[in-house]
Amino acid sequence: MSTEISQHELMQETHNGRLLRVEGLRTYFKTMDGIVKAVDGVSFDMPEGSSLGIVGESGCGKSVTSLSIMRLVERPGWIAGGRIWFHDKDLLHLPEEQMRQIRGDDISMVFQEPMTSLNPVYTLGDQVAEVVRVHRKVSRKEAMNRAIELFKLVGIPSPERRIKDYPHNMSGGMRQRVMIAMALANDPDLLILDEPTTALDVTIQAQILELVKDLQQRVNTAVMLITHDLGVVTEMSDRIIVMYAGRVVEDGDVLSVLKDPLHPYTKGLLASIPSLGKKNQRLNVIAGAVPNPLRMPQGCKFAPRCPYVMDVCRNEEPELLTQGEHGERKVRCWLY
Ligand code: SF4
């Protein structure tokens, strides 16, 4: 069956609440030693208001996937193929001006290190108000009132006073709240959080995650959470996608994946969680390392690390196939 869908089919699905559909996305990087296929044929979709966790070790392609959705992949990277539908728009074929409008208005992104995303010479209120004014025709005063409202929404105490602060006056956790406030400034339909709590200590991390969960229910924004920490995904998301070496290796609802992980890599990730939500966990229980992207194994990319490897695995790459009566799970492994 073709993975392409017609505009008509897509419009119908959109009306059924489909927000985002990524189809066969390929994002490559040119290096001195050859082409790195950072994302190689990734497909998934997200309904409106849903929560999706994309998990995998560093270099698996999860962040490049989110940057591709935002069309923020920088040279020497480029989107080599695939489609990204957002509502009824094909993002990869939109003029840059329309894409700029979508960024920060319909889709917002929060990165790991808030200090580098905030401008040290402007007050936080000015920075949040500026985001509001880029997308809405409002006065400076109205934008500042919206900033105060947003500070309240994300639980920053004394917002009228704190909007006058500069980034260095705030703790890491508070700065991350400001980033989330900024991302929510224009009521986006999709909020992408890329390792949003990795730089924070455990208590603050838990508070930020709790805040995002609460906001998702209150403002009905769909949340895509990108993380190396499977524990965080299990707390935050309804659905999970596990990526390895630029590919999706498992896709399913969080409870079923937790109860019955199918892919050996997912099993390894689950076994590497000492306690849910703990900071700085390293996924080093899985033997071996992620393959060199310039020298990928020929068959299954996980074969050199897999305790269940068979001959076929080394020669042929398995496809991502649906499992279960209603095709609710997907796995890329010859065991199934
Ligand atoms: Fe392991 Fe083979 Fe499955 Fe790859 S295809 S994960 S090597 S069993």
Image (spheres, rainbow, N blue to C red):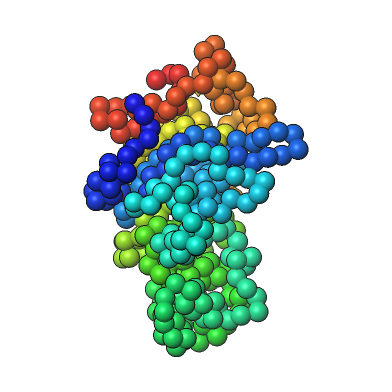
What residue appears at the point 46 percent right and 54 percent down from the top-left corner?
Answer: 94
Front in this rendered view, residue 330 or 90: 90
Q: Is residue 145 left or right of residue 17?
A: right
Q: Position of residue 96 (x, y in %)?
A: 51, 58
Q: Could you tell me how many numbered marks the image carries? A: 0
Q: Is residue 70 above or below residue 230?
A: below
Residue 288 against residue 160 in the figure, above or below:
above
Furthest residue toward right: 32
Give left or right: position of 224 versus 286.
left
* Res. 70 visible in picture: yes
Question: Residue at 48% across / 48% down in the picture?
Answer: 92
Residue 215 sits above or below residue 36 on the image: below
Residue 143, position as x, y percentages in the image: 44, 82
Going by the picture, which residue comes out furthest to the top? 311
Q: Is residue 250 left or right of residue 19?
A: right
Residue at horizontal 52 percent and vertical 81 percent from the top: 125
Quarter of the image that includes the N terminus: top left
Residue at (39, 20) in percent of width and height: 336
| Foreground residue among 249 and 70 | 70
Considering depth in this image, is 79 or 289 the residue closer to the camera? 79
Residue 273: x and y, percent? 50, 41
Q: Is residue 25 above or below residue 157?
A: above
Q: Position of residue 89 (x, y in %)?
A: 38, 52
Can the viewer see residue 206 in this picture? no
Front in this rendered view, residue 79 or 158: 79
